[in-house]
Amino acid sequence: MVLIREVVQQAFSTGCLEIAAEEQLRKLLTTKYDMEDFNAFMLLQEAAMSGQVKQESRELSRCIQQ
């Protein structure tokens, strides 16, 4: 089974959280996870808010709106 921290690591390595990875995170967050996964998710949240990691879903919606 994939762990939250693995999905987060992929997002950091590419600089982009893909739509499929977002969906995967939503599903993983409904299951039991440990503190390491929680901390990784929080780091991803901070990185997305600061623009360090882009969210594909938000980038697409901006393109559609323009």
Image: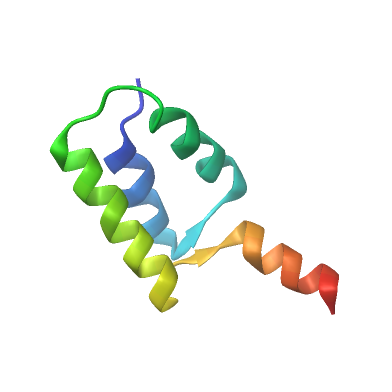
**Image location (x, y in percent) of residue 65:** 83, 73
- Report the quarter where the C terminus lies: bottom right
**Image location (x, y in percent) of residue 40:** 24, 50
The residue most toward the front is 30
Picture residue at 14% right of the left edge, 38% below the top: 35
Please say whether residue 33 is visible from this viewpoint: yes
The residue most toward the left is 35
Does 34 sit above or below residue 10? above
Q: How is the image coloured?
A: rainbow
**Image location (x, y in percent) of residue 18:** 56, 51
Q: Quadrant of residue 43?
A: bottom left
Please say whether residue 52 is visible from this viewpoint: no
- Of 39 and 16, nearer the camera is 39
Query: Number of labelled discs?
Result: 0
Picture residue at 36% right of the left edge, 27% below the top: 2
Picture residue at 84% right of the left edge, 68% below the top: 64
Picture residue at 61% right of the left edge, 48% below the top: 19
Does 21 sit above or below residue 1? below
Horizontal side of residue 22 vs 57, given as left or right: left
- Report the quarter where the N terminus lies: top left
Horizontal side of residue 46 vs 33, given as left or right: right
**Image location (x, y in percent) of residue 44:** 34, 58
